Image: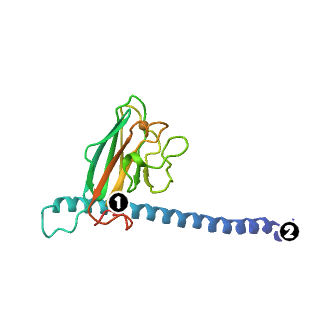
Amino acid sequence: MSIHERTLPPAATAHDRDHETVAVVAVVIASVAMVAALVAVGFAARAADESNKRTTLAVGSSAAPAAAPVTALPVTERNFAIAPAQTSVPAGLVDLAVTDRGPSAHEMLIFQTDLPADKLPLGPDGRVDESGDGVLKLFDSGDNIDVGTTKTFHIALAAGHYVMICNLPGHYLAGMHTALTVTGTPEVGSVVPAAQS
Ligand SMILES: [Cu+2]
């Protein structure tokens, strides 16, 4: 075996190692980018959090910027009615806390509509046609709210007329609907308000 022949395998290995190095560098760069992104998200969350604290502390000061208060809206569902703690809330961020008093599970849907709460379009099965004329579905709890539990949803509502319903089979027609008025600006159709800093 000549020296030349013996040097071939190490040369090939070195070549492979170059590829590995490139791969490792790529992974490191990707990792650094990911960490940077996470840090950025963390800073943004913290900045928003501190912004909220400042806003809260600044309430009452005439020099304070327009605040973005969060309105708590407790809603009770039972067979077969929906009862919000208040039927009118200011436009903006809402903490919708839905409690199910049973005796069965319910869901929570919110439509923007000019129709009365008991006049939403129905499908052939007697449930509300969620993509029917005159209704725009803005919120859907997805999973049911189990009996005896409360689920809180953070939503943003523009000024306008809304109807909250439960659309499990038979529940709407049995009476699970109620109107909700959202007052102030902006009006429905403009940009939904987000947290302001
Ligand atoms: Cu229901």
Q: Which mark is residue 45?
A: 1
User: Residue tagged by mark 2?
Assistant: 2
The mark nearer the N terminus, 2 or 1, is 2
Mark 1, Cα crowd under 10 Å, few <14 / some 14-19 / many 20+, is: few
Kind of residue at badge 1: Ala
Distance from mark 1 CB to nearest ligand 1 atom below 8 Å: no
Task: Tell me the residue at 55%/43% (across/down).
Answer: 124
Mark 2, Cα crowd under 10 Å, few <14 / some 14-19 / many 20+, is: few
Looking at the image, residue 146 lies above or below residue 183: above
Looking at the image, residue 126 lies above or below residue 6: above
Task: Tell me the residue at 33%/61% (across/down).
Answer: 158
Q: Position of residue 20 (x, y in %)?
A: 65, 64
Q: How is the image coloured?
A: rainbow
- In the rendered view, does 158 fall on the left or right side of 136? left
Task: Tell me the residue at 80%/68% (across/down).
Answer: 8
Distance from mark 2 CB to nearest ligand 1 atom below 8 Å: no
Instruction: State the residue in front, 118 or 184.
Output: 118
- In the rendered view, does 10 fall on the left or right side of 76? right
Name the element at disc 2.
Answer: loop
- In the rendered view, does 54 fall on the left or right side of 129? left
Q: Quarter for ligand 1?
A: top left
